[in-house]
Image (cartoon, helix red, strand yellow):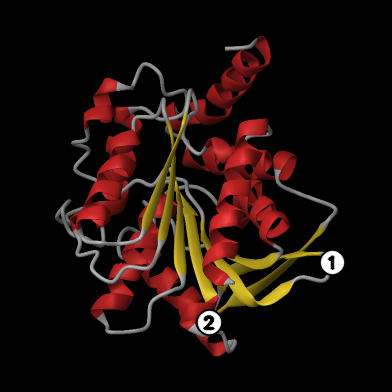
Amino acid sequence: MTKREQKLIELIRRVHGLVDSPDIEKKRQSQEQWGAFLGNSKEITYQEFDIKDMVAEWVVVNRPHVRRNVILYCHGGGYSTGSTKYARTITSKLALSTSMDVLAFDYRLAPENPYPAALEDAVRAWDYLMLCGYGSRDIVIAGDSAGGNMVLALVHKLKEEKRMLPKALVLFSPWTDMTCNGESFMGRRQYDPVLTPEYLYQIRADYVKDEDYVNPYVSPLYGDFKDFPPTLIQVGENEILYSDASRLYEEMTKQRVLVQFEEYEKMWHVFQMSPIKKAQEAIDKCAEFICEICR
């Protein structure tokens, strides 16, 4: 590991080190600052508005671009932190690399609003796009960490209601199993600079409350993936949620979903947010996948 990489990992540890703090507002403020520092781009217009009292944001490139397709983005943060501004560390990159508009939204957070509030808000964002005139096949849904969980839970919900499904899914380090039983959960804890088992136990308790951990809307890994849209999964080698991503790939493959799995050597949880070459390479891979599916 180079000195620059070491310094970056130390910075990431400091930013995410607030996960050990009991002050949830400090965590949320820290992420807002992180998003403002790394996410904003002069090449993009950020258009904030409300979807039935829920803050949302269009991320739009300042050049002629594709408008028939759109990316619906579900931000991470363990269902207890995160926002559209925090998500700009990825939504800006996606908009620039795909030349597509990106819609992000501030779903209700735990512990103030436990499950199923966030999932209900994801459905609200999906319905908004339907009202805007997009067809389901015009939409790619993407998300990171708990946002990846939300993407899968949303598609399970749409499928259960016999609604049309999106064109494709993109998942960055998805949290797919709230039983926390994956091999990497403990096996890679010494290498992960972002997450700890203790932190995930805490945010799980805040979000899930009395729900069954194998409920597919809580742990999408245990759902039925038949007829799911083409899916791209990206994960870092050094993260404790590695097994959540790899087992999702295995389940989707068994159920004959067109799924692509990309592992990035020495990378950490949602490294795509970071200002490093490998992060941009991963985003470019996403753009290739999305553009190939949507052409």
Q: Earlier in the sequence, mark 2 or mark 1?
A: 1
Q: Measure the C-alpha gap from mark 2 to mark 1.
A: 24 Å
Task: List the residue tagged with mark 2.
Answer: 128
User: Relative to 99, is 84 on the left or the right?
Assistant: left
Q: Quadrant of residue 151 in the image?
A: bottom left
Name the residue: 34% across, 30% down. 240
Asked which secondary structure carries label 2, the reply is helix
Name the residue: 55% across, 44% down. 28
Between circles 2 and 1, the one closer to the viewer is 1
Mark 1: few/some/many CA within 10 Å (<14, 14-19, 20+): few
Query: Residue 180 has which mark?
Result: none
Mark 2: few/some/many CA within 10 Å (<14, 14-19, 20+): some
User: Relative to 68, is 111 on the left or the right?
Assistant: left
Using the rendered image of the protein, determine whether residue 23 is visible from the camera's viewpoint. Answer: yes
Query: Residue 63 has which mark?
Result: 1
Name the residue: 46% across, 72% down. 167
Specify the quadrant that holds the C terminus: bottom right
Relative depth, front residue between 285 and 69? 285
Relative depth, front residue between 23 and 71? 71
Using the rendered image of the protein, determine whether residue 219 is visible from the camera's viewpoint. Answer: no
Q: Position of residue 136 (x, y in %)?
A: 47, 81
Asked which secondary structure carries label 1, the reply is loop
Identity, as a three-letter code, of the amino acid under mark 2: Tyr
Relative depth, front residue between 289 and 57? 289
Question: What is the total number of numbered labels drawn onto the structure image?
Answer: 2
Q: Position of residue 89 (x, y in %)?
A: 65, 46
Specify the quadrant that holds the N terminus: top right
Q: Position of residue 86 (x, y in %)?
A: 61, 48
Identity, as a three-letter code, of the amino acid under mark 1: Arg
The answer to whether 184 is drawn above or below residue 157 in the figure is: above
